[in-house]
């Protein structure tokens, strides 16, 4: 990987990963004593991540606001010691941000593109996360069935950010969730409209009624919008009771 200076090529520099002072308090609350680890990840994103085309150059100055903090606050919806599967992980968002913020989580990053999985493997090693984070190169359906010879995988929580509309997300992600587990889809202003449009598909796939939650209220502005779908039914089984999603130190907001 590069040294992060950009001095020889005039490329991206580590200076762009510096935590803005106005976000310092929120970042400290979200990442706690692992804030330095989050900063190291931010530096890798704005240097190698940009060079490799995983992060747009214009995103580098906003890496904390739009990416790290925006993703890490979703930990509020994840119970302690959960197994998390991050579908379409890309540069590791939200999966790596969650793994840094919550060392109790076990995270699998699912990504089909080779150049992205190489980056993810290197980042996991450099940040010392190999004990809790693994990288799977393949599609979500391959992870769910174990058709590549690795897996099958299943988790308490399946996350996805900027991957696809809710109907396709449910198709790909719900099979990876254990019965009573949940899909957490990071969405924007389209959340309510997507739920209305794709509710029948979600239910047909065994999902419960989707709910919308705001994560990071009082910490980041705007908060992160998350659509949550509990996998209530597995083919051939009766619907599961809605499981409670915990957050560190208490119950999740909105329940």
Image (cartoon, grey):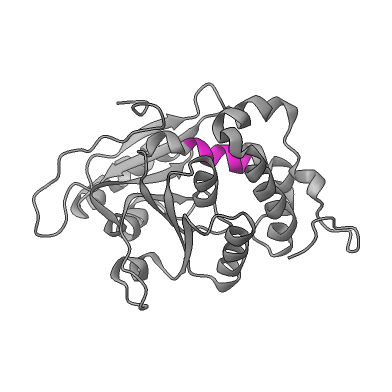
Residue 42 image point, x, y percent: 68, 47
Q: Identify the image quadrant of the C terminus.
A: top left
- Which quarter of the picture shows residue 104? top left
Rendered view: 182 above or below 92: above
Rendered view: 248 above or below 218: below
Residue 226 image point, x, y percent: 42, 38
Principal SS element in the magenta part?
helix
Rendered view: 214 above or below 169: above
Q: In the depicted view, which residue is nearer to us: 140 or 72?
A: 72
Question: How many marks are shown on the rendered structure?
Answer: 0
Q: In the depicted view, which residue is nearer to us: 73 or 225?
A: 73
State the residue at coordinates (60%, 70%): 115
Residue 150 image point, x, y percent: 37, 73
Work out whether residue 189 can be spotted.
no
Residue 146 image point, x, y percent: 32, 72
Q: In the depicted view, which residue is nearer to us: 133 or 162?
A: 133
Work out whether residue 176 can be spotted.
yes
Horizontal arrangement in the rendering, residue 197 relative to residue 53 (left or right) = left
Furthest residue to the top? 218
Question: Range of the magenta residues?
Answer: 66-73
State the residue at coordinates (49%, 57%): 131
- Which quarter of the picture shows residue 17? top right
State the residue at coordinates (74%, 27%): 21
Q: In the rendered structure, does residue 208 fall within the stretch colored magenta? A: no
Furthest residue to the right? 8
Q: Identify the image quadrant of the N terminus.
A: bottom right
């Amino acid at each position: 990987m590069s040294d992060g200076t950009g001095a020889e090529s005039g490329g991206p520099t580590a200076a762009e990963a510096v935590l803005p002072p106005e976000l310092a308090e929120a970042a400290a609350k979200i990442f706690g004593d692992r804030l330095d680890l989050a900063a190291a990840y931010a530096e890798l994103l704005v240097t190698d991540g940009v060079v490799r085309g995983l992060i747009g150059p214009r995103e580098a100055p906003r890496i904390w606001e739009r990416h790290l903090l925006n993703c890490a606050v979703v930990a509020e919806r994840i119970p302690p010691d959960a197994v998390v599967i991050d579908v379409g992980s890309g540069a590791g968002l939200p999966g790596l941000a969650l793994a840094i913020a919550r060392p109790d989580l076990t995270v699998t990053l699912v990504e089909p593109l080779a150049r992205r999985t190489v980056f993810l493997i290197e980042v996991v090693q450099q940040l010392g996360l190999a004990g809790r984070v693994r990288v799977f190169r393949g599609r979500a359906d391959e992870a769910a069935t174990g058709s590549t010879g690795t897996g099958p995988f299943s988790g308490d929580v399946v996350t996805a950010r900027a991957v696809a509309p809710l109907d396709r997300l449910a198709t790909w992600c719900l099979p990876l969730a254990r019965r009573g587990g949940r899909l957490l889809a990071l969405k924007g202003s389209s959340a309510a409209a997507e739920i209305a449009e794709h509710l029948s598909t979600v239910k047909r796939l065994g999902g419960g009624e989707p709910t919308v939650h705001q994560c990071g209220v009082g910490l980041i502005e705007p908060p992160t919008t998350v659509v949550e779908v509990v996998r209530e039914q597995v083919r051939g089984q009766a619907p599961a009771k809605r499981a409670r999603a915990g957050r560190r130190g208490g119950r999740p907001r909105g329940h």
